[in-house]
Amino acid sequence: MTAVGDRIKTLKAAKNAVILAHTYQPPEVQDCADYVGDSYGLSVEATATQAETIIFCGVMFMAETAAILNPHKTVIIPEPRAGCPMAEMIRPSDLVSLKARNPGHIVVCYVNSTAEIKALSDVCCTSSNALAIVENLPIDKGIIFVPDKHLGSYVEEKTGRAMVLWNGFCPTHAKITPELVLKARTAHPRAIVLMHPEAPRVSRALADQVLSTGGMCSFAKKDIHEEFIIATESGIIHTLEKQNPDKHFFPVADGLTCPNMKKTTLDLVLRSLEGSAGKKVVVAPAIAEKARHALVRMMEMSGK
């Protein structure tokens, strides 16, 4: 462990802090974390931890989620400028108008959204539990799904439930084109393709498995194949290689990275623990209370 890593470990213990990191974070940030996972796993871990302080290495909507679920804990994001383009593609006024045009519809909100959007929703979901959430909604009710049209279309395909979709998307996953998938298959003919449902429908049709990031990690551990083409943000390959040292993982394309996920550095994590960097995440109580209802309902419907 480096000197910085040693200092982080010492401060965590002294301040009763825990470090949570998304699988898209830089390798050195993942390596210093107490828990690395996808959005759903991080949500569960945030509620389970006994630590007084959560250092959340991810983007703002994730840190907001942790703060909403833990109103009596301190949540700090090392890089407060780490946003999410998809989350910014829908404003509260947009969702209010969408609900007015579709009265009586249940609003399912992907966690990749702001606290304000969650507060206007009935239930949240992640890519790992979206199918289960929608499958358990009343069949006689219409559904609004925001903000990711690609995840929404995937849920429609798998559940047969027609939904009103918002025109949001992840710019990083939108780069996964059929051409890139076919090129990767040619380069690695023995590998199977694992793809995130945030990718466009035409590309998902070429995947062997469509999985959340957590789903990819679980699948790779138990699958008999030794080579995998990974069609999601490239940071997860570090996680996969650590968990499966005897298997090989190839990015579907070079440079498939989320700029915001890469803004967190080990130095920022250390300085957040020292108190010289980072930002305490505070969600207005009225917003947090409503958003918490949608998040808790998600966890209840997911059996967690």
Image (cartoon, rainbow, N blue to C red):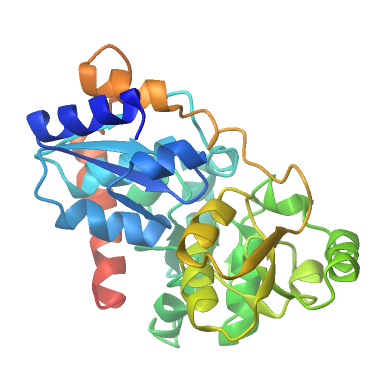
Q: Position of residue 107 (x, y in %)?
A: 43, 63
Quick check: 132 above or below 283? below
117 vs 194, left or right, is left
Q: Residue furthest top?
A: 276
Q: Nearer the viewer, residue 158 or 235?
A: 235
Q: Nearer the viewer, residue 259 or 25?
A: 25
Residue at image x 40%, y 76%?
133
Q: Position of residue 283 (x, y in %)?
A: 26, 33
Q: Position of residue 163 (x, y in %)?
A: 58, 72
259 vs 40, left or right, is right
Q: Position of residue 156 (x, y in %)?
A: 61, 78
Query: Is residue 115 something one can see in this rendering?
Result: no
1 vs 189, left or right, is left
Quick check: 124 above or below 134? above
Residue at image x 38%, y 22%?
268
Q: Quadrant of residue 76?
A: top left
Query: Is residue 289 something one can see in this rendering?
Result: yes
Residue at image x 62%, y 51%?
233
